[in-house]
Amino acid sequence: MLLAGVLATIGLAVIFFADASIPNAALLGAVNLLLAGGVLFSVVRAARDPRPRMVLDRDGIWYRDWPVGKVPWRFLRGVYMQGSRFQTFACVELRDPESFLAALGEAERRKCRSNRLVRLPCLLVPHGALDAPLEQIADAIGAALAQRTG
């Protein structure tokens, strides 16, 4: 939402106040407003999506923003916190990333290379992505993993 607001403000400022000093100011402002609309649409659509963002069940863990589908418990080693005070992640660590990737289809492997939440051997869950505090999520994943793997 913040990015959409900044883009819209820049677009409006360019259209109304920089007309004489910037060539094609109206076009530049309109492009910024279109980008702001696209970002806003994407954020609103994601926020209104009724599907759960994460599921922990007897078969494994599924997180909507990972391009790998459900990750079976047998592939997981543990979970811990990582990152900085500006961006913290719960790192769900894989036991053997190579065998995990081998179990995926070619399309999923390609998506893994470009997804910012896949940093092997970790699958990342960013702070603020879910409704619960990240520490609580990491604890729940850790408890479920301990229960499933003994």
Image: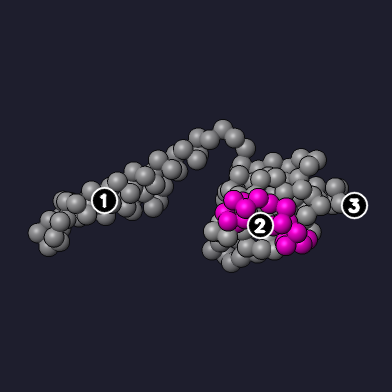
Residue located farthest toward the left when viewing the structure as drawn: 20
Whether residue 65 is visible to the viewer of this picture, yes or no, is yes
Q: Earlier in the sequence, mark 2 or mark 3?
A: 2
Which of the labelled discs sits on residue 31, or is there none? 1
In magenta segment, residue 95:
yes
* Residue type highlighted by circle 2: Leu
Q: CA distance from mark 3 to mark 1?
A: 55 Å
Residue located farthest toward the bottom when viewing the structure as drawn: 84
| Left or right position of 115 against 56 | left
Span highlighted in magenta in the image? 93-112
In magenta segment, residue 64:
no
Q: CA distance from mark 2 to mark 3?
A: 21 Å
* Residue type highlighted by circle 3: Gly
In this view, 105 is above or below 86: above
Secondary structure, mark 1, is: helix
* Residue type highlighted by circle 1: Val
Q: Nearer the viewer, residue 9 or 149?
A: 149
| Left or right position of 121 against 107 | right
- Which residue corresponds to mark 2? 123
Residue pictured at 75% horizontal, 59% vertical: 99
Q: Earlier in the sequence, mark 1 or mark 2?
A: 1
Q: Position of residue 92 (x, y in %)?
A: 71, 57
Q: CA distance from mark 1 to mark 2?
A: 35 Å
Assign the magenta stretch its main secondary structure.
helix
In this view, 50 is above or below 97: above
Q: Are marks 1 and 2 in contact (CB under 8 Å)?
A: no
Residue located farthest toward the front when viewing the structure as drawn: 106
Residue pictured at 73% horizontal, 42% vertical: 56
Identify the image quadrant of residue 17: bottom left
